[in-house]
Every structure is written in C-alpha cells, then in structure tokens.
Image (spheres, rainbow, N blue to C red):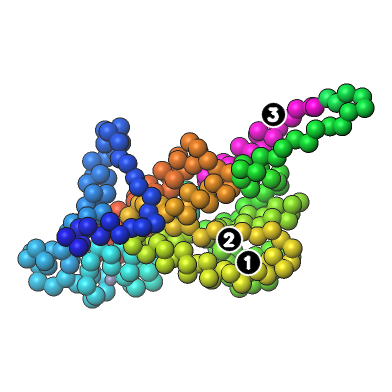
Amino acid sequence: MRQQGAWMKWEQAMERSVTWKDIWQWNPQRIKFLIQEVYDVLPSPSNLCIWGKIETPACPLCSKIGTLEHILSSCSKALGEGRYRWRHDQVLKSITEAISKGIKGRRRTQATAKTIHFVKEGQRPEKTPRNRSAGLLPTARDWVMSVDLERQLKMPPHITQTRLGPDTILVSEATKQLVLLELTVPWEERMEEAQERKREKYQELVEDCRRNRWKTRCMPVEVGSRGFASHSLSKAYGTLGITGANRRRAIGNNVEAAEKASRWLWLKRGEQWGQ
Ligand SMILES: [Zn+2]
C-alpha cells in the first residue's frame, strides 16, 4: 500500500486527467507505462525480487537496489552516463519552444494591434490602463532567449559575472529585465525539495543582478520524471504571460516529453547508453 499509494504524497504535482480521447489516440504501451509507473508496479529488479521471480534486486547498471525510483532518478551510473541529462534536455526543449512561441505571438499582436486614439482640441489624452495581468513577455519588444542545450550558458558579462549557468536566460536590454528559468526533472516526491534547492542556488546571483539595476526574476520549475508538472511550471508560464489554452498545450507537451524520455530510460535500463 505504501508503495502503490506513494502518489498521494505528491503535494506539488498538478493533477492530470487522461481523457477518453487520449485513451483512443495514445499508443496502448504509453497508457500501460503511465499507470504502472505511477503505482510502481513495473517489473523493476526490486519488484521482481519481491514477486519471487529473481534472486537479487540489483540495478543492471550499478549493484544497488533497483527500485523504479533508483532506475529513473537516483542511479549514479545512469547520472554519470548522461541519461538523466538527456531527459532533462528533452523537457527543456519543449518548455523553451512554448516560451519562444509566446515571444513570437506577442510580436504578432503588437504588429496588428496598433490603434490611434484621437483627442479633441483642448482635451488631455486619457491614460490607457496597462494590463498588468498580461505577464512579462508583453512588457518588452526585444526579448532574447538563450538556452543551455549543447553547452553551458554564461550570464552576459555586462549583467553580472558568475560561474553559475541557468538553463534558460531571457533578456530585454531595452527594459533591463532578466528572467532566469531553471528546470529540474525530479522524482515526483522530491519536487518541493528541488524547488528550494534551486532557489537557494541562484539567490545570490539574483541579488547581484538586481544590484546592477536589472529587474530580475528567477523561476525554478519542475517536471516530475513520471510526467507530472509542478504548480511552479504553471505559475512560471503565467508570470511570462502564457495563459489559457496556450499554457495547457505547453504543459501537456512538457509532461509528454518527460514521460516519453523516462519510458526510453526504462526500456534501455540494462543496455549501453549512446546517442
Ligand atoms: Zn543503479
């Protein structure tokens, strides 16, 4: 019960609803894997041993106990071989695609929504109320996004000098705004811990940038290794101004990326890793 009901302790994870449409459209193997991984009933070495099918519950890569959690999230050999990094980058790619669409979409609406407000002689122009709830992306026209996919990112030296390299940096030179986005793909039970660790890691950097008069935001986000997004991801999209159907679509793509990558890691658990 403790093992199969562990999902009840995922406090930061957003609920997922698998609709009938999904069930018709998805590959049956995908649904099977999703259900088995959530309830931890996949034939991991540790489960096979409990079920009396094998003698020792060893991980095929190292000799530690091969639970699902170990294979998908805690194996030091898998980590060293870059397996988890590869999954992280799959999810990061899908997040930055959504942000990049958000930036482009903003440019389009700016180009089409130019209205001229005429003012009668002797009257003062009314101040147009700025929509503060629209998020950060609409507040500048010159956002440039850099992503840490092939090589580690460096902070632009005119903003601050640091050895830290966040996953994604968004800069608007004109408005002196800076957004740091840092992704973790943790085991679902450890989302909160990942959030706190990353926030602490970047705190000093954020303060340095603010001292240099950059309006800085640091947004650690988590997508769990079994395909459940943390509320922090949804909030980060909202802060940027990606909301409604666009946000739902983005999160759907992000969790799918995590889920697919984890399934691949699971299938390759006993095989050589090479891309
Ligand atoms: Zn291992």
Q: Amino acid at mark 2?
A: Cys
Give the residue type at disc 1: Val
Bounds of the magenta span?
Answer: 96-117
Q: Answer with mark 2 or mark 1, whichever residue precedes in sequence.
A: 1
Looking at numbered disc 3 in the image, what kind of residue is underneath it?
Thr
Question: Where does label 1 land, which residue?
Answer: 206
Q: Quadrant of residue 44?
A: bottom left
Q: Residues within 10 Å of mark 1 (few under 14, many from 20)?
A: many
Contact between labelled residues 1 and 2, with CB atoms less than 8 Å apart: yes
Residue at the bottom extreme of this rendering: 63
Along the viewing direction, whichever of 232 and 67 lies nearer the viewer: 232
Q: Mark 2 sits on what residue?
A: 218
For mark 3, give the secondary structure: helix
Of 182 and 268, the residue lying toward us: 182
Q: CA distance from mark 3 to mark 2?
A: 31 Å
- Residue 185: quadrant of the picture: bottom left
Instruction: Tell which residue pokes out farthest to the right in this image.
Output: 122
